[in-house]
């Protein structure tokens, strides 16, 4: 049984590579912002990356928030772990973990 239907994610062409690029760009942007001590902006980027939760009718918002809560908590936790890590290699390790 497929959990994600085929028509929700791009599978070929330009849209597929654009999707991969944007998904891999998020941890890099968060890592750079945490290194520059713009933690609030990094947290905002993680929250804004879930904009599709609200791109539907308002009656679906509660179920979308509940469905994306784990991903949102993981992203915010990674940013907080990066913020409290001392050395930049540890922050890079957290960013790589977030990217995976």
Image (tube, grey):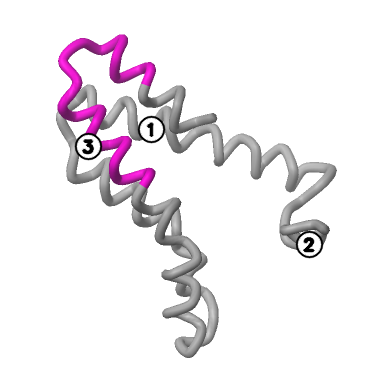
Q: Mark 3 and mark 2: span between their CA atoms?
A: 33 Å
In the rendered view, tell whether residue 87 sits above or below residue 44.
Answer: above
Q: Which residue is drawn at 15% across and 29% down?
A: 37
Q: How crowded is mark 2: few (under 14 residues within 10 Å), some or many (20 or more)?
A: few
Residue pictured at 25% horizontal, 12% vertical? 88
Q: Nearer the viewer, residue 9 or 29?
A: 9
- Considering the whole magenta stretch, tell me its main secondary structure: helix
Which circle's residue, 3 or 2, is located before the other in the chain? 2
Q: Is residue 5 above or below residue 87?
A: below
Give the quadrant of residue 80. top left
> Tag 3's secondary structure?
helix
Tell me which segment is drawn in magenta: 74-93
Q: Where is residue 50 shown, x and y percent of the image? A: 45, 58
In which quadrant is the C terminus drawn? top right
- To which residue does mark 2 refer? 5
Compute the Cα span from label 1 to label 3: 15 Å
Q: Which mark is residue 80?
A: 3
Classify the position of the N terminus by image quarter. bottom right
Q: Quadrant of residue 36?
A: top left
Q: Earlier in the sequence, mark 2 or mark 1?
A: 2
Q: Using the image as rendered, state which of residue 45 and residue 73 is in the foreground.
A: 73
Left-right relation of 66 to 41: right
Task: Assess whether residue 84 is covered by the magenta stretch.
Answer: yes
Q: Name the residue under label 1.
A: 29
State the separation of the CA atoms marked 2 and 1.
29 Å
Identity of the residue drawn at 50% across and 33% down: 25
Q: Is residue 31 magenta?
A: no
Q: Is residue 89 above or below residue 49?
A: above
């Amino acid at each position: 049984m497929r959990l994600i239907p085929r028509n929700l994610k791009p599978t070929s062409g330009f849209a597929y590579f654009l999707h991969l690029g944007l998904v891999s760009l998020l941890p890099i942007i968060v890592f750079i912002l945490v290194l520059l001590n713009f933690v609030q902006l990094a947290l905002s980027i993680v929250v804004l990356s879930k904009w599709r939760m609200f791109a539907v009718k308002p009656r679906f918002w509660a179920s979308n928030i509940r469905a994306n809560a784990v991903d949102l908590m993981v992203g915010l936790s990674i940013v907080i772990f990066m913020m409290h890590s001392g050395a930049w290699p540890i922050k890079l390790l957290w960013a790589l973990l977030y990217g995976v």
